[in-house]
Image (tube, coloured by chain):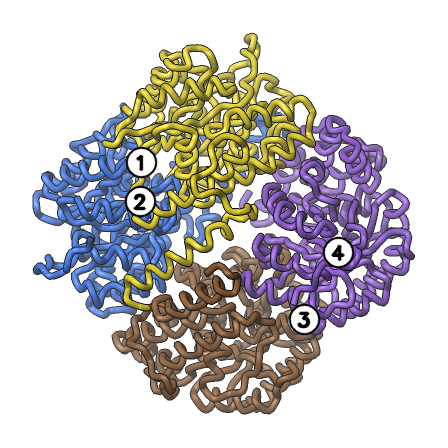
Chain colours: A yellow, B purple, C brown, D blue
Amino acid sequence: MPQPASTPAKPRIEGIFTPNIVPLLPDGSIHEAELRRYVDWLIQNGVHGLYPNGSTGEFTRFTCEERQRIGKIVCEQAAGRVPVLVGAAEANVRETLAACERYAEYGARAVAIVAPYYFKLSPESVYAYFREIALHTPIDVTLYNIPAFASPIDLPTIKRLAEFERIVAIKDSSGDLPFMMRMIAAVRPMRPDFAFLTGWDAVLTPMLLIGVDGGTNAISGVTPELTRKLYDLTRAGQLAEATRLQYRLLELFDAMLYSADFPEGIRAAVELRGFQVGRGRQPQTERQTIDYRMLQNVLQCILADFGCAAAPAGGCPPRTGNIDQDRISHIAATVVETLRQRGAI
Amino acid sequence: MPQPASTPAKPRIEGIFTPNIVPLLPDGSIHEAELRRYVDWLIQNGVHGLYPNGSTGEFTRFTCEERQRIGKIVCEQAAGRVPVLVGAAEANVRETLAACERYAEYGARAVAIVAPYYFKLSPESVYAYFREIALHTPIDVTLYNIPAFASPIDLPTIKRLAEFERIVAIKDSSGDLPFMMRMIAAVRPMRPDFAFLTGWDAVLTPMLLIGVDGGTNAISGVTPELTRKLYDLTRAGQLAEATRLQYRLLELFDAMLYSADFPEGIRAAVELRGFQVGRGRQPQTERQTIDYRMLQNVLQCILADFGCAAAPAGGCPPRTGNIDQDRISHIAATVVETLRQRGAI
Amino acid sequence: MPQPASTPAKPRIEGIFTPNIVPLLPDGSIHEAELRRYVDWLIQNGVHGLYPNGSTGEFTRFTCEERQRIGKIVCEQAAGRVPVLVGAAEANVRETLAACERYAEYGARAVAIVAPYYFKLSPESVYAYFREIALHTPIDVTLYNIPAFASPIDLPTIKRLAEFERIVAIKDSSGDLPFMMRMIAAVRPMRPDFAFLTGWDAVLTPMLLIGVDGGTNAISGVTPELTRKLYDLTRAGQLAEATRLQYRLLELFDAMLYSADFPEGIRAAVELRGFQVGRGRQPQTERQTIDYRMLQNVLQCILADFGCAAAPAGGCPPRTGNIDQDRISHIAATVVETLRQRGAI
Amino acid sequence: MPQPASTPAKPRIEGIFTPNIVPLLPDGSIHEAELRRYVDWLIQNGVHGLYPNGSTGEFTRFTCEERQRIGKIVCEQAAGRVPVLVGAAEANVRETLAACERYAEYGARAVAIVAPYYFKLSPESVYAYFREIALHTPIDVTLYNIPAFASPIDLPTIKRLAEFERIVAIKDSSGDLPFMMRMIAAVRPMRPDFAFLTGWDAVLTPMLLIGVDGGTNAISGVTPELTRKLYDLTRAGQLAEATRLQYRLLELFDAMLYSADFPEGIRAAVELRGFQVGRGRQPQTERQTIDYRMLQNVLQCILADFGCAAAPAGGCPPRTGNIDQDRISHIAATVVETLRQRGAI
């Protein structure tokens, strides 16, 4: 039963929340010290909040116990300096609620819960799932809509879910601007405390323009100072400058997103900012390992342009704004090598 | 062979181009007088140009001869007051080039050519198609990318095609903001005369913000004065007001787009602006005819809010911003009626 | 208004209908003499019927006049030896009905009409479209469902349309076996004269097994004698042998379908059977022209295995059943060449 | 490094493996006694093997510990009477390998491992993932391809993975017949011991015809005796009778699959066979609970036709073969009720 939204609402969640990656030790376990150092660095560089156990944080590749440990570390390390949203999706509602309790104890501002994935659920089932959580959670809930990976949360479902006081925000990673506008138009009049966060870094400025409250943007884990600057410029109405920066960040975003399986590109870039991220949990072939180093070279050049990294020793080629072209000689070399190995040439 | 882009370029195409619907007589033929009156009205209400034989103009539902007649009427009636882009896609390259010649004679500013449809072509074939046209056309060409209906024109293909001087613009109806940014980033440095037009009305303001030159927006055929105002406000940097208007136009756009098969909703709305549009060429069932009238009622209420139409005689219900809810009693009535007819209740 | 299906029904359409390609002269016009020779050859090699103006026949790339000429040539040349289904889809219902009248005069057994394409229509609109045709056509109609290219005709719509006596068959190119079973289960009890034809050559034997009446298979334009043999073996219950042949034809089908934009692979193979097909109407780049010759080499080797063509002069490599591998040295050569041209190596 | 496939291979996995649902107690925990009774019943009714922790078994909705308990119970209860494939996908490769060891101890014939899900991985990453597992698993592995839910395992990847001796089978739930044929054509010559299992119940007979070794079919958990009969009839070449049975089972399959979110329809049907399945772990709304009972009524009528259940007390309506029509009065009632609650009528 939806509760009346009569109690004095907490302020809306807003700003840039970093969905942090998790540094790993050589044996594949969580590198706690480096994670704490990374959290400090992010806060010092201006992000408004943290978001462990998101997609960027590869929550599906950790065990339940590891996810809770990650949430605990980040909450502890943030130590009230910035709010923390913790990803709390577990195998089923009971486990998810148990996780919610844990994160409430750790002092999280709210949890974020992705719609059920693997199975593609109907809107009615998506509603039933979040309703059950909303009715029993001891902590505020952010809906997490990422239709590329999980069952979509459609507009009528969002409207129905916004009737629950415990549901206080939606993070939408579709990047669909009109969809965001439809959500805002439908929900804001009845829930002025409800926050809208975009997870699609490529359109942060346009999203802020049409009224979102902030973003949970993977790119802020790589260039927190620039993402914050983009946010501040847009908020200040300096749109020409904001747009220029958005274009430049788009190039970085595209390079990270489309040159390796997500979120390897993010991990590669965080490493360039000086963190020991370790090898990811998804195994890689030799070819992918080479590609990873190639990509880091490209990323280093982009980051060097921003002044966020030193240029690589070998220097950077004149940039074409075209990752494909920048990598063509590598690809050709790979083909030729493959053929040679197979005895074809 | 790409020509050097050395000749003094014409000014970039820019502004709002209306993809006009075609009024029909009761026998289904083109209602020339009404089309001319409609063209006058659009120009008087501020659109920067016209765009006959677009998707809104249902070019696929007319014969080759009819398409050329429509192009001729619109060019004649515009009479140099505003530029005209004429949709020139025909069954094959030879026919398309013949149409290009015709539209050049009629005084069109350029033609717009949709990527091949029905067959889903590879990027290489899309390139080959437009290259052949670019090499022989006597008139400037606007590429038309509408991946929902036709073979997509991807980014590498656009870059290759921008090497042809005769290709001077792209109209993109994907509504994908980052894709537009990637195109602009890739093409503008080498082709400052190349124009980017968005065909997705729901994001006109954000698109202008990131640098597009204008739009070919179906909604401008319904509310030319408001679309022009949205354009002017955005250009003038009055973004708060522009965004408010964009939100309101989104409601109109959604109602027209998602309550009937495209472009019936546009036709229904143009009729409300005082034009005899006649019945469309796609047959309708009785249920659809009822839905069409229901939709017009909703549209009339939205237009009345804008001051663009009188409210319907029966008055307007309090608006929920939710077409679905506004129509629910109709849907229920339809279900009940259907059941009754089938003897189920 | 659906007519009662009381009149004595004509026998069901059945067997293999060839959706023929159209040979072209060097100037791009229809090569009538070669088309007639091709029709004769197909009939002599055992196909049960012909199907001009299908997707394989690239109906969208001809003008309305050309389509009618193609239909006329095929009907004349068949001369009653086998039935002809003529693709009759035109720009709108009026034009389509005019084409139906023409094909009735030419002696076609029926027309085949693809669901509206370009615009994606709702089921209700698809129904309205075919209903209008069914009510006024002077000739039997075959529905043509090809969801990859045109608006889908879904199951409830097929059931509604099967109430019209003039609609006598459906050609389904989805290749979806359970969908075909659902259609047969729903329609056959009430319309025993209604025929089901599959357009997906890769599953002809399984489709015949579950009860379809025949196929309109592009592969039958390349290997009519083998397609006929596959049909006969399956009908005779010699399923082990039929399945072996189906596997071998799948290799040919895949090579034709996935190595070039449809239907260039079919055209390439028909040429190998001794017909002057000419260059297709869709332009090709130089790279595609090379690919076309490469593909013909592969196809010639496959056809030589069947005894349908001489092996190429250079001989055939040991076949891997893997087109990709067979072409890898070509691809590598192309990459290297491209790099060389760009000065990259 | 792929091992030579030189050691004497175990016999190919073959026959019908039931992906069992998991009965639950009122408190949501595993109903072990009922699961054991269900396993016995399945074996007594002729299934060739069991497959716990599949999609039907909702493996994602259990914790790691619960999954292992389910695998243990089923292995124990099967007690060597039939082979068991246990779904072993865990959060990452290390956890998955730990599970593999456990299932090897429990006596499973092999594990089945779904491709990584949530993240959509490239073919290279899918390969890297399974390679890592293949190199270290102590038990044979069945690949599980279910592109609707998880990263697809494409043809080149399957060929590469078939080089590992430990990978002995693929379960494919795409239902794509030509894809299965391509896999068989590519892998069987080099790996005669490699098994192909279909997970798409609707085409079991055609799949067996083209050479698959068996199926992991949810429907066999509902009607094990009939699925076994379908298998035996097809194997015996009694294809007319097999096809008739396949049609009848398609109706049951469609009702279970398309009238509720998967696998609720399977659970509803298993309950009708006399098992206390309990409420599923995915929450349901009141409307869904009503729908569930409605669906059970329909399923009971279908099962009664097979003699697998008594007809419901209220009798069965004449069957239309159309679940939609059978449920229309329910839908109408729901609409009317909804309107009433909202005060709309």
Say which residue label 4 marks. B57
Q: Are marks 2 and 1 in contact (CB under 8 Å)?
A: yes
Say which residue label 1 marks. A279
Amino acid type at circle 2 is: Gln
Residue situated in front as seen by the camera: A66 or A259? A259
Q: Could you tell whether C21 is left or right of D106 in the image?
A: right
Q: What residue lies at 20% left-to-right and 65% top-to-bottom? A: D190
Between disc 4 and disc 2, the foreground one is: 2
**Element under label 3?**
helix
For mark 1, does the 10 Å Cα neighbourhood hold few (<14), some (14 to 19), or many (20 or more) residues? some
Q: Could you tell whether B9 is left or right of C237 in the image?
A: right
Which quadrant would residue C236 be assigned to in this image? bottom left
Which quadrant would residue B68 be assigned to in this image? bottom right
Q: Is residue C308 visible?
A: no
Say which residue label 3 marks. B93
User: Chain under label 1?
Assistant: A
